[in-house]
């Protein structure tokens, strides 16, 4: 079902990026940033909970079962969110590229014909607006207001993350169905909005988009093809759940 | 030279040597973030109230920190971010400027409020005389 496909992609993206970014908790570059980044990660887990709850009607799985008991190939997150946190430059750049897309996606979904999703979108758009504000200020600060060194590190991070970020928009089999049913305007439409939006911030930051020969290097995740990094993440994330899947919390 | 290592990677990153013969050189001035004072407005029409401060390299980043540190629990409608250096602070020694304030009861509204009671009492008395 088209709607199920869309909800699962979004839920898995939010769950995995939330888990990844929470790995910075306690290790952030400075205390205040640690708090802000952790809180943003926690918001993502909240979004995934809301989406998995919505999915329960279709799959019969509780949010816990959906999040913790599937095999890696059943996850439909994009590969971008799976990569290890790397240095703060990588995590920040991924946060910037991913959350800009999230904000635009949820803004579009406010008008979705699927009402539960439209309602959720209206509720969380403000939260994600803050995530983007946080990402934009850091990207500009470290690139345009930093040193030559910090600028070149951020440019390098952009070169690494940008091709992977295009995987966010890997088209699914149900694109046309979603468009026809007025549920969602589709990944291609979203990608165009995203290109314009990131360009604005990158210009302020003085960063240049790398030119690509292959725009599909970050593809695969939406069809269950993942990087070698997803399985270890799942092993760690589900460690406690697997001790006793029936335990009540 | 061995450096101090800690479970907190922020300590390790500083590269502080375990032993040094001469004291470490002074840090360069202004190589640290500035502090910003944060003010929150909780409802429409209310004043912005000082809630605390944050360290940040720019007012925008100060706002993004403050939103999480001071705005993630209760309801907040608006925030002000002010460079701490821009706050003109009075000298603690000058607290005696306020010393006689308590004795000036005639400046309190309380005293004027009693006028109403006196007028009422007067009217009551007039009424009694007329009757």
Image (cartoon, grey):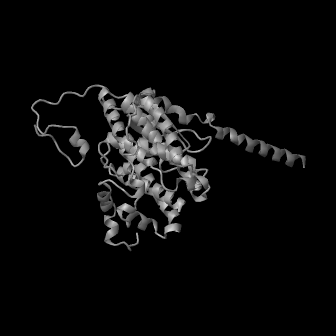
Question: Which of the 4 quarters of the picture holds residue A210?
Answer: top left
Q: Please provide percent x and percent y for residue A219.
A: 39, 49
The residue that appears at 52% across and 56% down in the rendered structure is A174
| Quadrant placement of the N terminus of chain B | top left
Residue A134 vs residue A243: left or right?
Answer: right
Residue A23 vs residue A5: left or right?
Answer: left
Residue A23 vs residue B117: left or right?
Answer: left
The one nearer the camera, A154 or B14, is: A154
Q: Please provide percent x and percent y for residue A224.
A: 39, 58
The one nearer the camera, B116 or A69, is: A69
The one nearer the camera, A218 or A28, is: A218
The one nearer the camera, B8 or A75, is: A75
The residue that appears at 77% across and 42% down in the rendered structure is B119
Question: Which of the 4 quarters of the picture holds residue A245?
Answer: bottom left
The residue that appears at 37% across and 54% down in the rendered structure is A19
Residue A95 in sight from this viewpoint:
yes
Q: Please provide percent x and percent y for residue A101.
A: 48, 44
Q: Please provide percent x and percent y for residue A73.
A: 37, 61
Q: Is residue A116 above or below residue A98?
A: below
Residue A46 in sight from this viewpoint:
no
Extreme-right residue of the structure: B131
Q: Is residue B127 above or below residue A62?
A: above
Extreme-front residue of the structure: A213
């Amino acid at each position: 079902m088209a709607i199920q496909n869309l909800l699962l992609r979004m839920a898995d993206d939010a769950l995995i990026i939330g888990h990844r970014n929470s790995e910075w908790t306690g290790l952030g570059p400075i205390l205040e940033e640690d708090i802000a980044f952790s809180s943003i990660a926690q918001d993502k887990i909240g979004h995934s909970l809301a989406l998995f709850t919505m999915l329960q009607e279709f799959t019969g799985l509780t949010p816990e079962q959906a999040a913790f008991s599937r095999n890696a190939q059943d996850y439909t997150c994009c590969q971008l969110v799976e990569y290890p946190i790397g240095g703060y430059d990588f995590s920040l750049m991924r946060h910037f590229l991913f959350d800009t897309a999230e904000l635009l996606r949820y803004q579009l979904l406010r008008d979705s014909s699927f009402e539960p999703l439209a309602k959720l979108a209206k509720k969380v758009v403000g939260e994600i607006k803050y995530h983007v504000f946080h990402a934009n200020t850091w990207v500009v600060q470290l690139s345009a207001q930093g040193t030559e060194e910090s600028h070149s590190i951020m440019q390098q991070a952009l070169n690494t993350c940008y091709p992977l970020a295009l995987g966010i928009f890997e088209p699914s089999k149900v694109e046309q169905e979603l468009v026809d049913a007025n549920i969602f305007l589709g990944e291609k439409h979203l990608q165009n909005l995203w290109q314009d939006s990131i360009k604005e911030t990158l210009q302020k930051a003085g960063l240049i988009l790398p030119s690509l020969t292959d725009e599909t290097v970050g593809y695969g995740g939406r069809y269950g093809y993942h990087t070698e990094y997803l399985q270890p993440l799942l092993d760690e994330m589900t460690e406690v759940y697997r001790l006793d899947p029936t335990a009540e919390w | 030279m061995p450096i101090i290592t800690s479970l907190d990677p922020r300590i390790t990153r500083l590269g502080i040597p375990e032993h040094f013969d001469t004291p470490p050189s002074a840090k360069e001035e202004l190589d640290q973030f500035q502090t910003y004072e944060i003010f929150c407005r909780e409802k429409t029409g209310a004043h912005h109230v000082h809630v605390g401060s944050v360290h940040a390299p720019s007012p925008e980043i100060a706002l993004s920190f403050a939103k999480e540190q001071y705005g993630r629990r209760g309801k907040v409608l608006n925030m002000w971010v002010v460079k701490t250096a821009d706050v003109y602070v009075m000298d603690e020694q000058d607290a005696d400027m306020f010393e006689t304030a308590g004795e000036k009861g005639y400046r309190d509204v309380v005293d004027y409020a009693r006028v109403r009671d006196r007028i009422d009492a007067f009217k009551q008395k007039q009424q009694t005389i007329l009757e």
